[in-house]
Image (cartoon, rainbow, N blue to C red):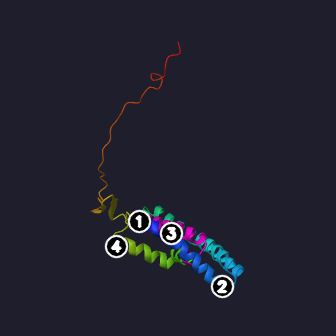
Amino acid sequence: MRALFLIFIIVPIVEMLLLFEVSDHIGGLSTVGLVVLTAAIGIQVLKQQGLSTFSRANKRLESGELPGQEIIEGLFLAVGGAFLLTPGFITDSVGFLFLIGPTRRMLVNWLLRSGKISVFTGATSRTFTASGFSHRENNSDGVYEGEFKAEKPVNSRLNEPDDH
């Protein structure tokens, strides 16, 4: 929590210092124009990459697979889009890393391999718990474990107060 607080304090200060430095070299209006240009380009890249990721997720769903990787990539796209809309060159750089397909997939694959994040793949499942991750083989014989309790439907007229 302390690290997150420091990030919210330090990053904006560094962003402002960098913006001031760039505006000293190329001028204030040019700096603002550059920030607006990166946001506009970022929105276009976000739109294109989002549609591509959505299309891949749809294909996986149609083939009976869960689009776990695509869901995580979608989260990266959302965070990258937010970074690009935040004024500054550092957040723009991180945002573009999250939006560019090969770097985004590389980051997602690294997170999956490290065990920091997990997805259901179909052959195996790893579930996230509060204490960490667990791993188990998927049962492919069509038998699902679970519990249910059959309850009789409640007659709603019995629960209404009498008006008489």
Badge 3 local density, few (<14 within 10 Å), some, or many (20+)? few
- In the image, 85 versus 153, the foreground residue is 85
SS type, badge 2: helix
Q: Answer with mark 3 or mark 4, whichever residue precedes in sequence.
A: 3
**Which circle marks residue 87 in the picture?**
none
The part of the chain drawn in magenta is 67-91
Q: Residue at x 43, y 72 (%)?
A: 108
The reply to whether the magenta stretch includes residue 72 is yes
**How far apart are labels 3 and 2 at the CA level?**
23 Å
Q: List x then y, in percent, for residue 84.
A: 58, 72
Q: Give the vertical position of 161 relative to 100 (above or below).
A: above
**What residue sits right under mark 2 in the picture?**
24
**What residue sits right under mark 3 in the picture?**
9
Quadrant position of the N terminus in the picture:
bottom left
The reply to whether the magenta stretch includes residue 66 is no
- At label 1, which amino acid type do we have? Arg
Badge 1 local density, few (<14 within 10 Å), some, or many (20+)? few
Q: Which residue is drawn at 66% across and 73% down?
A: 40
